[in-house]
Amino acid sequence: MFIELLKGVALLLALCFLHGINIRVWRQHPGVGQVLSGVIFGSICLVGMFAPVTIVPGVIFDARSVVLSMAGLFGGPWVACIAAAMAITGRLWLGGTGMEVGLLVIVLCTALGLVYRHGRALGRVGVEPVALALFGLLLHTAVIALFQLLPADISQRINQTLTLPYLLTFTPATVVLGLLLRDVEDRMRTELSLKESAARLHAIALAIPDVLLVLDAQGRYVEVLSSNDAALAASAPQLLGKRMDEMLPPEQARRFMALIQETLRSGATHTLEYEMLTLSGLRLFEGRTQPLGVQVRGQAAVVFLARDITERKHTESALRESELRFRSLLLNIPSISVQGYLQDGTTTYWNKASERLYGYTADEALGSNLLDLIIPHPLREAVRTDVQHMFATGEVIPAGELQMRRKDGSVVDVFSSHAYIQVPGQPPEMFCIDIDISDRKAAEEEARYLAFYDALTQLPNRRLLVDRLQQVLIHGARSGANTAVLFVDLDNFKTLNDTRGHEVGDLLLREVARRLRDCVREQDTVARLGGDEFVVVLQNLSSDASEAAAQVRTLGELILTRLRQPYELAGHEHHSSASVGVTLLSHYRDSVDEVLKQADMAMYRAKDAGRNTLRFFDPDMQQAVNRRALMEAALHNGLRQSQFLLLYQPQVDDQARITGAEALVRWQHPVQGMVPPSEFIPLAEECGLILPLGDWVMETAMRQQAQWRTDPALESLCLAINVSARQFLQDNFVERVLTLLQRTGANPTRIKLELTESLLLANVDNVIATMHALRAHGLGFSLDDFGTGYSSLSYLKRLPLDQIKIDQGFVRGVLQHPSDAAIARTIIALAASLGLGVIAEGVETTEHHAFLLAHGCKAFQGYLFGRPLALEEFENRARRGAIEAHLAPHSQPH
């Protein structure tokens, strides 16, 4: 009987073998594998039942308890159910006295195997020898207990003859089969894990752009992994099994072999850069070797990882070349100083332009502190604060004009910009880019001086006089002190100019200026309006009008006496005198222009009184005011009756081609005839009629330009329209102009508005805003009579101008007066530096034209090229193209 039980154990071993084969074969199809495993377990049960140990007929003993419990433990519900179903079928087939007990044994063993599986899944029990032994003992004790349900004589016989061999055989069998099946299970799990790991490693190796090689100690290619054969010297199949010296040039193969031997000897990682001819051409690589750690086919081996660095090397080379070019450019750029500083002010960079600008060599500057190097003492605290803020926030210090200090202690004007540079791994730096603007500042200062002072006498000009007189009047109104304005005009000065020349006349003007300055106090102002006209402003006089008048008369007599004294002019003695008009201001209701007019009128009274005398402005002069009132009434009537017309004076280029015209308004009075604008325009400005008159001029001119648009011969002409300051400063001026453009159909790009410098006496910011608003719609701007008014250069660079117009007073004097020539040249140069066009008006002679042309002026207007013309005559002349300059003498303009 014991031998029969051992046969059952042999069946269990066969079961283990078959189950292992089955799960290996069907690992890719686990569902099929489970069904077949169930069939195998069931078949083993059937074999055991058909060759059992039989005690009495119908009562059999076999290994199904072990098989079914292991089917539940290792196969799971499906395997266990299939095996149990087959076992039940077989037992029913066999029948006999113990069939019912046999069926209960099948169910019990299957159920206990599944319970064991569940406990294992929960981690409460493992598949260990002790656990399996206890399970086997429990299982088969339970089976023996079921045998007690058989008839008493049968169960007694079983207890006496089979119980002990049964427990001693199948309990160990349970342990052995459980361990064997666990081993099969572990082996399958290990194989699956290894396969998955190999698949992952292979996928990773193919996914990276690098080439991965396994090379043995003989330089043989054992493994070649690359996502692209283009990075290899040959395709992967061609390389496998070959030696390096068979596939690579000898020198390169020797170099790699030396690397492999050194890696195997040291056991450390080694790198090298090399160049190789691959299937995609000559490429650069970075190689890294690492010992593999295990032998391959009996030889030590290394892993070689090669990365294509061709593009990186090319990029690095390009960056180095770019950096070299950039550093060379910064170092040698001739006119831009570049310096670098750390947060504490230490100098890190100093190019050659910095050496020339500041006087320090690079050796002297590098390592020095910014504040000690070039920052003047008054600026140091502000610069320190700005630099710290820049390094703390990264906000760049705004660019601007600064005065820096040279090595010799002198100051230099620079335009300084800044950059904040942060390179990873290095401390941040501040770079200063400085441009020397000393010449420009000097030119601006010279131009500013010319704008405010008379170049001949160095006295304030009309522009500065108006400013000072305004301040004096305001101060007098507050203090109650009287102010006097003296208008001084030299007697018979024209005769001196005509007989002895303008150079001698200039000498006299200089001497007169000196004597006038000597006569007044330092707080008083002496100015030259132009020609031989001077103005003296006396402030802080007595608050009593009579006393103030006496003070002025005393000073006036002193001036007349000093001006009558002989002059030494170019080696000859000259005698001259002057006429002085005085207006005494105790009430400040009049404008500056009106005050000057009053003094001018008083001066003419002195002229009428025989010259070389002094006269005060008094009510007798009111007659002139009355005449102005009559003209004002006539002006109102002229507007109502359409007595005004437009004339067109040609504007030409340097080839004498007509490029446009200036629209000039004229008053055709029914009694007085053609009234010149010099008489009615100032009056219109004062009485406010300039607004309706200006609107009429602008609308008429725009309608005419719109008609020119339809004529191919005239459509390119530009039309300049004068706009008064009062008209331009209207709140709705922009809307009025745009409405006129829309209503008339004029081309805004062919319209140029001429503005006078008196505009700048008002709100400059509002003026600039209005100009920008109109410029956005295409209109251009020209600054008329430049140099005679009150335009600051700081405002000039902000104005969106297209053109500067040289005043005819300067143009006419360019050949006689060096100061006028200097001003004209300066205006032309200033316009060029600001990118503006320049046009000269009042060009009357070929000599004037030649002078201006030689000094860079490209546009002209004046009697040399044409008087103001009626519309039809101008259009006919414009259609003929280029015009010829009128070389014959012309009468003076009016």
Image (cartoon, rainbow, N blue to C red):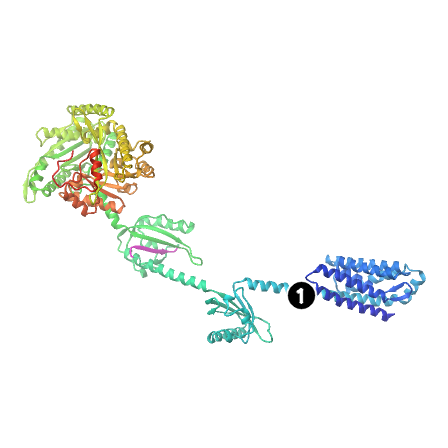
Residue at image point 72% right, 61% down: 33
Q: Is residue 631 visible?
A: yes
**Magenta residues (range):** 334-342
Left or right: 334 as drawn, with respect to 502: right
User: Relative to 268, is 69 above or below?
Assistant: above
Query: Residue 414, relative to residue 5: is it above or below?
Result: above
Query: What secondary structure is the stretch in magenta mostly built from?
Result: strand
Q: Quadrant of residue 827?
A: top left
User: Which quadrant of the figure contains the N terminus?
Assistant: bottom right
Q: Which residue matches tag 1?
A: 191
Front in this rendered view, residue 605 or 409 = 605
Name, please, the residue furthest toward the left.
572
Please name whichever residue, 498 or 201, is drawn nearer the observer in this view of the structure: 201
Q: Decide which of 389, 611 is in the foreground and name it.
A: 611
Query: Does 7 sit left or right of 399 as displayed?
Result: right
Residue 819: image quadrant is top left
Q: Please, is residue 192 above or below residue 473 in the view? A: below
Q: Quadrant of residue 623?
A: top left
In magenta segment, residue 84 = no
Of residues 673 and 219, the one nearer the viewer is 673
The residue positioned 27% from the left and 51% from the top of the image is: 411
Q: Is residue 274 visible to the viewer in this orientation of the structure?
A: no
Q: Is residue 653 above or below residue 249?
A: above
Please tell me how crowded label 1 is: few (under 14), some (14-19), or many (20+) other residues with Cα within 10 Å: few
Q: Amino acid at mark 1?
A: Glu
Write the residue at 55% across / 75% down. Answer: 217
Left or right: 403 in relation to 455: right
- Looking at the rendered image, the quarter that the C terminus falls into is top left
